[in-house]
C-alpha cells in the first residue's frame, strides 16, 4: 500500500486513558478526548461505539488511519542487520522477532522499520502486538468505517523524519526515539508509571541514568550522525 502526504488520513494516538486525533492535511487542530475503553482488549463493538462518539467533532472521517498504540502495550526491539543478501533480510528479522519476543509467528502481528545506510548492513526496529490484540483493534476500527489501517507504537508515529534522537514525554513515561534517514531505528520506554517523571524527585535520577545507558545502545550510524 502506498500512501502519499496528499492522501486523506487520520492519525489516532491512544494514551493510557486519552485519545488524540489529527486529520493529516486538514485545517483542524488536534482533538484530545478522554477514552473509556481499552482498544486492545475491549469488545470491538464497544470500541467502535466509543470512537464514533469521541470523533464526532471531526465530521466525516477519511478511510485511511494511522494508529499509535501505547509503547507499554507493544513489544519493541532494536536489531542490527549484518551484511547479507537483501532477500535474506525478511527471514532474518522474523527469526529475530521470534527470539526476542518468545512467541510463535502465528501469535504475532509484526511491524518492521529498516534503515540500511551501508551496503548489505543496517538497523531495524521490530514492533509487535499479540495477534489477538491486533485483530481486536482492527475489527473495532473497521466497524467505525476505516478500511486502510497502519498500526505502530505511538512514539514512532510522532517521531518525524530525518536523522535525529528525540525524547517524547507523556503522562505515563518518557520514550527515546531515534530515526535514521526518516526510518525509526530505536525505540525505548525510559520511565514508566504515572505523572510527569521530570517533576518527581525520586524519578528524575532514574530517568537520567536510564537515558545514559540507552544512548550508549543507539546504532552507531545514529551516534555518528
Image (tube, helix red, strand yellow):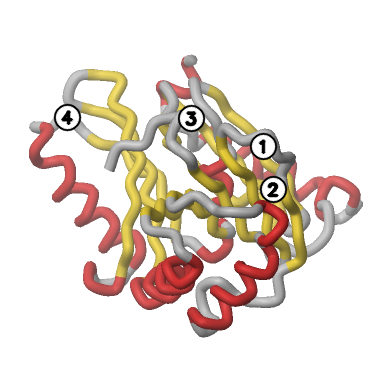
For the residues carrying marks 3 and 4, which lies nearer the camera in this image? Answer: 3
Answer above or below: position of 159 versus 151: above
**Image location (x, y in percent) of residue 192:** 69, 59
Residue in the image at 55% along x and 24% along y: 164
- Along the viewing direction, whichever of 101 and 20 lies nearer the viewer: 20
Q: How far apart are marks 2 and 4 (CA)?
A: 33 Å
Q: How far apart are marks 1 and 4 (CA)?
A: 30 Å
Marks 2 and 3, the one that precedes in the sequence? 2
**Res 174 label:** 2
Q: What element carries label 2?
A: strand
Mark 1 and 2 residues: CB-CB less than 8 Å, in contact?
yes
Marks 1 and 4, the one that precedes in the sequence? 4
Mark 2 and 3 residues: CB-CB less than 8 Å, in contact?
no
- Along the viewing direction, whichever of 35 and 8 lies nearer the viewer: 8
**Res 179 label:** 3
Q: Is residue 177 left or right of residue 143?
A: right
Answer above or below: position of 50 versus 45: above
Amino acid at each position: 500500500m502506498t500512501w502519499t502526504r496528499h492522501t486523506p488520513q487520520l492519525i489516532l494516538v491512544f494514551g493510557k486513558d486519552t485519545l488524540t486525533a489529527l486529520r493529516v492535511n486538514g485545517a483542524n487542530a488536534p482533538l484530545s478526548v478522554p477514552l473509556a475503553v481499552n482498544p486492545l482488549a475491549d469488545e470491538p463493538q464497544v470500541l467502535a461505539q466509543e470512537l464514533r462518539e469521541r470523533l464526532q467533532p471531526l465530521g466525516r472521517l477519511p478511510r485511511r488511519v494511522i494508529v499509535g498504540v501505547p509503547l507499554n502495550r507493544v513489544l519493541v526491539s532494536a536489531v542490527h542487520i549484518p551484511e547479507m543478501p537483501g532477500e535474506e533480510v525478511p527471514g532474518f528479522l522474523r527469526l529475530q522477532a521470534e527470539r526476542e519476543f518468545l512467541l510463535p509467528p502465528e501469535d504475532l502481528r509484526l511491524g518492521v522499520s529498516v534503515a540500511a545506510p551501508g551496503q548489505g548492513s543496517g538497523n531495524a526496529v521490530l514492533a509487535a502486538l499479540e495477534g489477538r490484540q491486533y485483530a481486536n483493534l482492527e475489527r473495532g476500527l473497521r466497524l467505525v468505517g476505516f478500511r486502510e489501517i497502519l498500526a505502530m507504537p505511538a512514539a514512532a508515529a510522532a517521531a518525524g523524519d530525518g536523522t535525529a534522537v528525540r525524547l517524547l514525554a507523556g503522562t505515563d513515561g518518557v520514550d527515546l526515539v531515534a530515526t535514521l534517514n526518516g526510518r525509526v531505528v530505536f525505540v525505548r520506554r525510559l520511565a514508566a508509571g504515572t505523572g510527569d517523571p521530570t517533576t518527581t524527585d525520586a524519578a528524575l535520577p532514574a530517568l537520567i541514568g536510564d537515558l545514559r545507558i540507552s544512548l550508549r545502545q543507539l546504532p552507531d550510524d545514529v551516534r555518528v550522525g
